[in-house]
Amino acid sequence: MEAMTETYQSLLSEEQPGVLHFGGARMVMLDVGAGFWGLRRQIEALVGPRLTDSVLQQAGANGGASFARAFAGPADDAQALRDCIAAYQAAGFGQFEVEALDWPIGRALVRGREAFEAWTMQQYGQSPESPVCAYTAGVLVGFVNALAGRHDVVCIERACQAHGAESCLFE
């Protein structure tokens, strides 16, 4: 299939100060790092870290699927996934590179540097015992599920910068 010909600049418009439209999705500019940090800490205090990761991953999957449907429409190809990941990166959530992709999804490897959750943990001097990028893993799952018309894809974070790795690795 053909690659997307629109540029990210042509898809971005400012509705009012602090409110952007990116493709078909509405985005609100705010301090995601501090907001996310506070949310994670409050949820962890209520239900613990494992359930927190599950909640954040599901929230990411819902948001990723919604964005993919608005941004790429009914596209069912590898380029649409690459475009969604590039848009996520352009929105400031980290630096991402698709290292391997077997489409329709059999296996995908995405390397992330400065993923916002790992970056936030580092900013607050935290050294977690396990990977922390559950929301980003969920977003990637949401992209894939929406674009491939599936509901069974899962994402495992194999390495995490917040845990001491050079980069985050999502499979």
Image: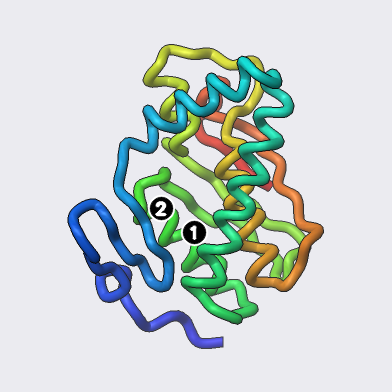
Residue 39 drawn at (x, y percent): 50, 28
- Whether residue 25 is situated above or below residue 119 in the rendered picture: below
Q: In which quarter of the image is residue 6?
A: bottom left
Residue 44 drawn at (x, y percent): 62, 20
Looking at the image, residue 95 sits to the left or right of residue 13; the answer is: right
Report crowding for label 2: few under 14, some 14 to 19, many 20 or more residues within 10 A (C-alpha). some
- Whether residue 86 is situated above or below residue 29 in the rendered picture: below
- Whether residue 78 is situated above or below residue 154 in the rendered picture: below
Q: Residue at x 41, y 43 (%)?
A: 94
Q: Distance between the residues labelled 2 and 1?
A: 6 Å
Residue marked by disc 2: 89
Q: Which residue is drawn at 66% across and 28% down?
A: 52
Residue farthest to the right, as pictured = 152
For label 2, the SS is helix
Q: In which quarter of the image is residue 62?
A: bottom right
Q: Which mark is residue 77?
A: none
Q: Residue at x 64, y 71 (%)?
A: 147
The answer to whether mark 2 and mark 1 are in CB contact below 8 A is yes
Identify the image quadrant of the N terminus: bottom right
Residue 71 drawn at (x, y percent): 47, 71
Residue 145 drawn at (x, y percent): 69, 64
Report crowding for label 1: few under 14, some 14 to 19, many 20 or more residues within 10 A (C-alpha). many
Residue marked by disc 1: 85
Camera-nearest residue between 114 and 55? 55
For label 1, the SS is helix
Camera-nearest residue between 112 and 12? 12
| Kind of residue at disc 2 | Gln
| Kind of residue at disc 1 | Ile
